[in-house]
Amino acid sequence: YLYRLDSDRLLHMFRVTAGLPSSAQPLGGWEAPNMEIRGHTMGHYLSACAMLYASTGDEEIKAKADAIVAELEKCQQALGGKYLSAYPETLFDRLESGQGAWVPWYSMHKIFAGLLDMYVHAGNEKALEILINLTDWAKGRIDKLSDEDMARILRVEFGGMNEVLYNLYEIT
């Protein structure tokens, strides 16, 4: 199944968000261009590839996932070197202002976890670099929030980010 998923389709909205060209057909469902949860599948995918590689030594799936990580780095660089997602930062702006956004931190948690798994289970140093840059972005974003802002956000978003940030802290 992991081989059947088209890398360019998985990367499509990351590229679009970064202002990079993409001729891939967008994915549908929760990954459709109009869905605010898009991008989370990428994180799940990278985790699955990393764990498959760790358990089987499958070099072909590692190469596929490594190539995706390289493309994600291009997207992150196009977005200024810190932020990386399949949706614009404006979703976080809306969430923080109380205007509503689906679950941008949930999707971000999946991206963080996928990158971390690529480093831990597949030895991809670039994934760790991307993740540390992304963590710098998250810290900068959170540091600007008041306690009241955080309380409002936690009514919508809570959970997984704590785990992945703890796991990253543990290895860095």
Image (cartoon, grey):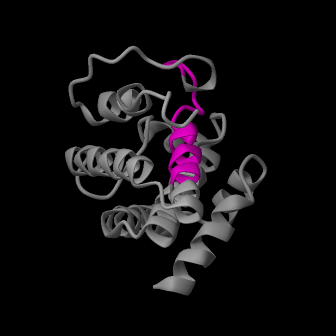
Q: Is residue 121 above or below residue 3?
A: below
x and y, in percent, of residue 16 in the image: 32, 27
The span picked out in magenta is: 32-49
- At a point 52% along the width and 50% down the height, the residue shown is 49
- At a point 53% along the width and 19% down the height, the residue shown is 32
Give the quadrant of residue 64.
top left
x and y, in percent, of residue 170 in the image: 56, 85
Q: Let me know if residue 144 appears in the view.
A: no
x and y, in percent, of residue 144 in the image: 48, 65
Give the quadrant of residue 2.
top right
- At a point 22% along the width and 46% down the height, the residue shown is 74
Q: Is residue 44 magenta?
A: yes
Q: In this view, does 168 lie above or below 56?
A: below
Quadrant, the C terminus: bottom left
Q: Let me know if residue 169 appears in the view.
A: yes
Q: In this view, does 77 lie above or below 119?
A: above
In the visual, does 19 lie left or right of 45? Answer: left
